[in-house]
Image (cartoon, helix red, strand yellow):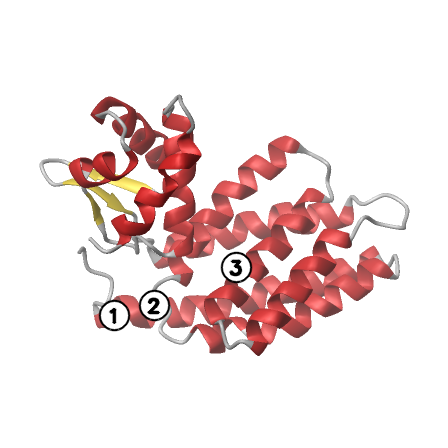
Amino acid sequence: MAELTGLADDRALLGRTSTAERVADILRSRIAEGYFPPGTRLSEDSIGGALGVSRNTLREAFRLLTHERLLVHELNRGVFVRVLTVEDVEDIYRVRRLVECAVVRGLGRPPYAVDGLAAAVAEGRAAARARDWKGVSTANIHFHRELVALAGSDRTDEVMRSVFAELRLAFHVVDDPRRLHEPYLARNRQLLEALQSGDRTEAERLLTEYLDDSLSGLVDTYARRVAEGGLGTR
């Protein structure tokens, strides 16, 4: 597996104690980055050898990521990166709308701490100039994580970290990432400007429309990919 070359470089991140949580962090990042696409079987021997961890530690990491809905265990077949259904994608957006819109609605009096949002907008524009559409996707996720962080709630951040990681499973099977992600560069900027001006009502309106349009575009693309049979195991 070509992915294992880069994974071996992550061994230093484990430090001296190779805990399951740290292994899960590494695998979560690799899944989010698309190194292990949906449907990929994860080999205990190969990944354990690349990271230099025991089978028990790796299995515990797999269990944690299965709980987060990033992996699935299939009896007598092994552990696979999860392939979302269209219904899964719709439910992810249901959660996003409930949480993200509530965060904006619940903001106190301005000014708001939007430096992280501004940095994510700049990151997305730089990726677009480089025609790095995966980078645009990553910047978009960073934007929405920063938006959620405006709530100042570690628990909400944790919940949405898992939601965004799961969302990226859908993004990784899209065959035209530019078409999917490029339109939201300008919309992220509009959201940022509304918050910079202190208009949370306008920001919530923009965000609601944004999420509805994003869901519609992603579901159309994802359903077509499912119908084409492009999401098999590897």
In three-dimensional space, the C-alpha distance between marks 3 and 2, rounded to whole angstroms, equals: 22 Å
In three-dimensional space, the C-alpha distance between marks 1 and 2, rounded to whole angstroms, equals: 6 Å
Mark 1 — residue?
A: 227
Mark 2 — residue?
A: 223
CB atoms of marks 1 and 2 within 8 Å:
yes
Residue 199, how many percent across, how many down?
86, 59
104 lies left or right of 34: right
Check disc 2 and report its element: helix, strand or loop.
Answer: helix
The C terminus lies in which quarter of the figure? bottom left
Nearer to us: label 3 or label 2 = 3
Look at 37% across and 69% down and name the residue there: 174
* Placement of 72 over or under 22, stated as above or below: below
* Placement of 60 over or under 2, stated as above or below: above
**Residue 171 visible in the shown view:** yes
Look at 61% across and 31% down and name the residue there: 155
**Residue 69 visible in the shown view:** no
Q: Is disc 1 surrounded by few (<14), some (14 to 19) or many (20+) residues within 10 Å?
A: few
Residue 223, how many percent across, how many down?
34, 68
Q: Amino acid at mark 1?
A: Ala
Look at 39% across and 72% down and name the residue there: 221
Check disc 3 and report its element: helix, strand or loop.
Answer: helix
Q: Amino acid at mark 2?
A: Ala
Q: How many marks?
A: 3
CB atoms of marks 3 and 2 within 8 Å:
no
Mark 3 — residue?
A: 138
In three-dimensional space, the C-alpha distance between marks 1 and 3, rounded to whole angstroms, equals: 26 Å
Check disc 1 and report its element: helix, strand or loop.
Answer: helix
